[in-house]
Image (cartoon, grey):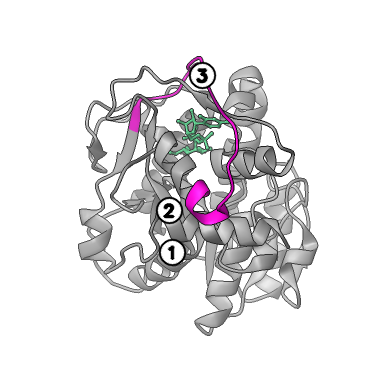
Amino acid sequence: MTGGAGYIGAHVVRALEASGHVAIALDDLTAGLSERLGQTELVSFDLASPGAKDQLIETFRTKNIEAVIHLAARKAVGESVLRPEFYYQQNLNSVINLLEAMHEANVLKLVFSSSAAVYGSPELSLVPEDYNCKPINPYGETKLIGEWMISNAQRAWGLRAVALRYFNVAGAGFDDLGDTSVANLIPIALKAIREDKPIEVFGSDWPTKDGSCIRDYIHVADLADAHIRALEYLNEENREHLVFNVGSGQGSSVLEVIQALRDVIQKDFKVNLVARRAGDPAELAADVSRINSTLNWQAKHDLLSIVESAYRASLN
Ligand code: UFG
């Protein structure tokens, strides 16, 4: 499990252990926190470095690894626009090292964490997996190329892979596993409220129901469960699909997220409507029929539960 000490990774580790698997976390701890792992074994090196392939082969062999869940990646969209080479170096070299090492060590199962960022700005309100992907930033490009690499490895040497395209992941499945990075709307808003500063809404003139952007918020605990379903799917002989959207199937606007924060926190706070943020699509939400029917998975938590759990974890 790469990226196992991250906010999402640590939830996946706990879901794996709860379902009877033994997980080993591989994390270079640049964004991950070892305290999220408790008793889970941690192996630490940079997956994108030239020596990583040999370290991976060694790890696969000595620890009898049966499957890999690859979450480790740089994921800040804005930073990817400013430092594209770094994003390509990190997010693609890691996949190359991983695939080469898996091939050599004969580890044949892979769950790859992809992103709704592969779609760019789709013209549909609920986007299905076979929609024409046109990412609009280097981060989304690295995820799409990662999908292409694993799809080719699947054809070339029998890799069994699934790519999960995460939509907007938020909330906390455990109070000690909140998102501490303050990089996305809900953690940013919670921090602003704590510091008695206004929440900035990026754009109020989008062509949407209330003028603010629409996203598909998915509870991190539901997302973690989707990884368990994906692993089970890899046991099947004939797998029809390589990619799956992981979302709630419902779009929520920024103003609806702010209303949910008001409902949960029961306190008034300031909101400023400011200019649009460059690179934002107006609307991005998942068509989840494929994951519902093929993996028998659907989101259990709604927006209120996402916001409520994120708030509770932020008090921890
Ligand atoms: N937003 C605000 N104010 C803020 C922060 C965000 O209005 O202070 C708005 C954004 O404009 C956007 C929405 O809140 O409309 C969500 O923004 P985030 O920055 O939380 O997330 P993004 O939708 O930009 O991107 C996230 C992940 C990506 C992933 C994408 C998939 O960060 O990695 O979801 O949908 F690809």
Q: Residue at x 38, y 73 (%)?
A: 232
The segment highlighted magenta reads: 261-283
Please identify the quarter of the rendering in which residue 259 is found. top left
The residue where tag 1 is placed is: 222
Real-space Cα separation, disc 2 to disc 3, in angstroms: 22 Å
Question: Residue flagged by tag 3: what amino acid is it?
Answer: Arg
Vertical side of 288 occupied by 257: above or below: above
- Asked if ligand 1 lies within 8 A of label 3, the reply is yes
Q: Residues within 10 Å of mark 1 (few under 14, many from 20)?
A: many
Q: Is residue 202 visible?
A: yes
Which mark is first along the chain, 3 or 2? Answer: 2
Residue 103 visible (yes or no): no
Asked if the residues shown at circle 2 and circle 1 are in contact, with their CB atoms under 8 angstroms apart, the answer is yes
Taking depth in this image into account, of 277 and 152 the one nearest to the observer is 277
Query: Observer-nearest residue: 59 or 173?
Result: 173
70 or 124: which is nearer to us?
124
The residue at which mark 3 appears reads as 277
Quadrant, the C terminus: bottom right
Residue 220, compared with residue 47, is above or below; it is below
Kindly identify which residue carries mark 2: 218
Q: Residue 4 vs residue 158: left or right?
A: right
Distance from label 2 to label 1 (Cα)? 7 Å
In what element is the residue under mark 3?
loop
- Left or right: residue 2 compared with residue 228: right
